[in-house]
Amino acid sequence: MSVYTRLCSAVLFPLHERLKGHDTVRRLRALEDSQSWSRQRLDALRLERLTRFLRDAREQVPYYRDVLPAVDTDARDFMTILRSLPFLDKAIIREQGERMKSRTALGLRKLSTGGSTGEPLTFWVGRERISHDVAAKWRATRWWGVDIGDPEIVLWGSPIEVGAQDRFRSIRDRVFRTTLLPAFRMSDAQMSEHLAAIVAGRPRMLFGYPSALALLAEHARDRAINVASLGIRVVFCTGETLLDSQRSLLEQSFRAPVANGYGARDAGFIAHQCPSGTLHISAEDVIVEIVNATGDRVPEGHEGEIVVTHLATGSSPMIRYRTGDIGTLRVDGCSCGRTLPALADVRGRSTDLIRTVDGNTMHALALIYVLRERPEVRAFKIIQESLQLLRVQVVPGSGFVPETGEAIRGGLLARMGKGTVVIVDTVAAIEPEKSGKYRYVVSRVSAKGSNIDA
């Protein structure tokens, strides 16, 4: 660690957080201590925190005053307590509005999701959740031998965040050696500029959407731009499902390991990957349940929807929040020595699952495989318009001929079955979502098989 990095990590950033009213440093120290506790000790902490959290929500939050039962103070299992509570989803948050806020909340920030999976969601976060998110990310950063103050390049896509580069934030980023590059501008010219900034900046870490980082890596490879010898220690990916092919491409291109992270703007940072490959949950503040289609909890090792209770959201509580993501809790421990529970797999949004006319459901990867192994396809996007219509946008590469489109159509029909129409359109470029993310598969069909926009 350089002298300047040590100054940023030990002095400048803690001062920055204290001036903002965040207790990030205290939380970081607590998180770095508790990550190796026994599971019994950690569970006791979670039970204590959950009991207090639910009691405060019932007393201070109008919505939860109406729907939460009295807390069983004699319960010895926090999962048993959660099982008796109602779920929270985006529809309830939109409907309840101000009634989701604690009467004692101060300094709330109003945020919204990008809406890439449907209608944007507006919600509130307080200083406690922000402090947790920063501390949890900071802890995970240190797992990889990098720290705040090490040169970092962030490839991000939210127009709100990128547009907020006012004078103070610009100065702050320079002090902490963070460079923000817009992910929603990914033309050939823009990617060349991004790569020039990376080569010149020689960052210790990259952070961004896997799809955007993968596009950048492909651009570097196709133009023989050397990014392998820059000394990058780790590539942090979040915001989307990280595909195996993307991980392989990024590791080969930047000669650095890829650390996956799982979270959401509304649900907060949930899990971070350690160097041993385990996606550890930030369990001190985040309780993850996996439930099936009827809302019943499934055993560890079985797949279902990820439901989150975030204990650092007292200002606007997230209790049994249905994320819409599909995942699996890991059964075994991790060789890294951290005892935090973990996710074995996160497969992406439930809206990225494909429904067929005959009632079957398949993961988007079943369709992605038809296209991504074809060298004559430069880029693609699959859109399920309805149960009967699948539309594919293809950016043709060298060797693409009409027969290629027919082969793609045939491969997709074989997976979708009879009764589906597949249309393959060639386009000049795949446009990102408003958030700047590149989604390979978009389903506009609900879990019940009806059109989401209907």
Image (cartoon, helix red, strand yellow):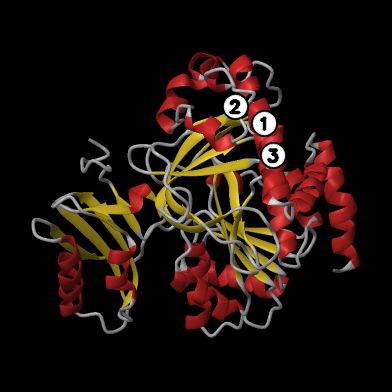
First reached walking from the N terminus: tag 2 or tag 1: 1
Give the residue displayed 68% in from the left and 26% down from the top.
52
Picture layout, residue 215 above or below residue 349: below
Q: Position of residue 235 (x, y in %)?
A: 62, 67
Which residue type does callout 1 highlight? Answer: Gly
First reached walking from the N terminus: tag 3 or tag 2: 3
Q: Secondary structure at mark 1?
A: loop
Residue 314 visible somewhere in the drawing: no
Q: Position of residue 207 (x, y in %)?
A: 62, 61
Q: Nearer the viewer, residue 224 or 446?
A: 446
Which residue type does callout 3 highlight? Answer: Ala
CB under 8 Å between discs 2 and 1:
yes
Query: Which mark lies nearer to you, 3 or 2?
Result: 3
Residue 82 visible somewhere in the drawing: yes
User: Which labelled disc corresponds to residue 126?
Assistant: 1
Q: Which residue is mark 2?
A: 316
Give the residue displayed 74% in from the left and 55% down from the top.
36
The quadrant in which residue 288 appears is top right
Picture layout, residue 227 above or below residue 390: below
Direction from residue 386 to residue 59 in the image, left or right: right
Picture layout, residue 116 above or below residue 295: below
Classify mark 1: residues with Cα within 10 Å, few (<14), some (14-19) or many (20+).
many
* 3D distance between C-alphas at marks 3 and 1: 25 Å
Give the residue displayed 83% in from the left and 49% down from the top.
13
Q: Position of residue 119 (x, y in %)?
A: 39, 36
Q: Secondary structure at mark 3?
A: helix
Classify mark 3: residues with Cα within 10 Å, few (<14), some (14-19) or many (20+).
some
Give the residue displayed 79% in from the left and 46% down from the top.
30
Which residue type does callout 2 highlight? Answer: Ser
Total tally of numbered discs in the picture: 3
Q: Which residue is mark 3?
A: 44
